[in-house]
């Protein structure tokens, strides 16, 4: 799996750009409104009292806008900090996944290596002891017991003692005797 931190970086940059754009757009609109309002006030040719009232109103509006912007700025900073912490978490997870992947690859290589070794060992065993000379019951020890009624040489001593008095290959009732190789 390839680490992908670039997407999250783009998101943080986008959040900052969006905040800047919103600020400029919002301030622009508000300044236009105030400008239009002042022009209208000039047109109707009101007295000084009206002008002062208008200036006071505008000051109050500006003060509120400033407060709202301060609040917005704080919100944006929190959001950016949150996005950055998320990005950090994503990076940590990516590193963990990367490490786990390399561990997995190492383990996979080891498994392949041991499988190869097991295969080679099996081949060597078969070379040393051909399958047809191994006890047909335990598949481990060499065949050494021959069933005298059928003539099958098929079991080791240990297995012959564990089973009933019948040949394990043809099921003929028979006693078995041990064959000694010299
Ligand atoms: Zn056996
Ligand atoms: Zn038999």
Image (cartoon, grey):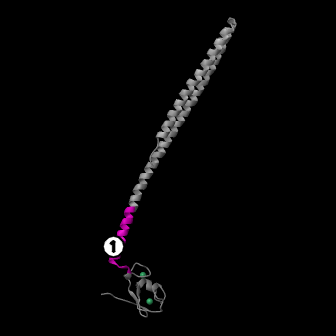
Q: Position of residue 149 (x, y in %)?
A: 43, 94
Please give left or right for residue 166 compared with residue 68 in the image.
left
Please give left or right for residue 107 compared with residue 26 in the image.
left
Q: Quadrant of ligand 2?
A: bottom left
Residue 40 occupies which quadrant of the picture?
top right
- Name the residue at 44% across, 52% down: 101
Determine whether the residue tagged by mark 1 lies in a helix, strand or loop.
Answer: helix
Number of marks in the rendered image: 1
Q: Tell whether position 11 is magenta.
A: no
Q: Is residue 76 above or below residue 34?
A: below
Which is nearer the eye, 108 or 50? 50
- Name the residue at 58% across, 21% down: 28
Q: Position of residue 108 (x, y in %)?
A: 41, 58
Q: Say which quadrant the C terminus sits in.
A: bottom left
Please give left or right for residue 48 compared with residue 94 in the image.
right
Magenta stretch, main secondary structure, is helix
Q: Which residues are magenta?
A: 112-131
Residue linked to disc 1: 124
Residue neighbourhood size for the residue with mark 1, other residues' Cα within 10 Å, grouped as few (<14), some (14–19), many (≥20): few
Q: Is residue 2 above or below residue 41?
A: below
Residue 157 occupies which quadrant of the picture?
bottom left
Furthest-bottom residue in this view: 149
- Name the residue at 66% across, 14% down: 57
Q: Position of residue 91 (x, y in %)?
A: 47, 42
């Amino acid at each position: 799996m390839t680490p992908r931190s670039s997407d999250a970086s783009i998101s943080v940059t986008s959040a900052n750009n969006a905040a800047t754009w919103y600020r400029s757009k919002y301030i622009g609109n508000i300044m236009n409104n105030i400008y239009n309002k002042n022009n209208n006030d000039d047109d109707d040719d009101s007295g000084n009292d009206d002008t002062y009232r208008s200036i006071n109103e505008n000051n109050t509006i500006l003060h509120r806008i400033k407060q709202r912007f301060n609040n917005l700025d704080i919100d944006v900073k929190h959001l950016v900090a949150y996005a950055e912490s998320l990005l950090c978490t994503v990076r940590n997870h990516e590193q963990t996944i990367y490490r786990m992947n390399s561990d997995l690859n190492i383990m996979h290589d080891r498994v392949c290596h041991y499988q190869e070794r097991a295969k080679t060992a099996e081949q060597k065993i078969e070379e040393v002891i051909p399958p047809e000379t191994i006890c047909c019951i335990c598949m481990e020890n060499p065949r050494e017991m021959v069933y005298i009624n059928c003539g099958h040489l098929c079991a080791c001593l240990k297995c012959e003692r564990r089973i009933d008095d019948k040949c394990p290959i043809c099921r003929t009732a028979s006693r078995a005797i041990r064959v000694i190789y010299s």
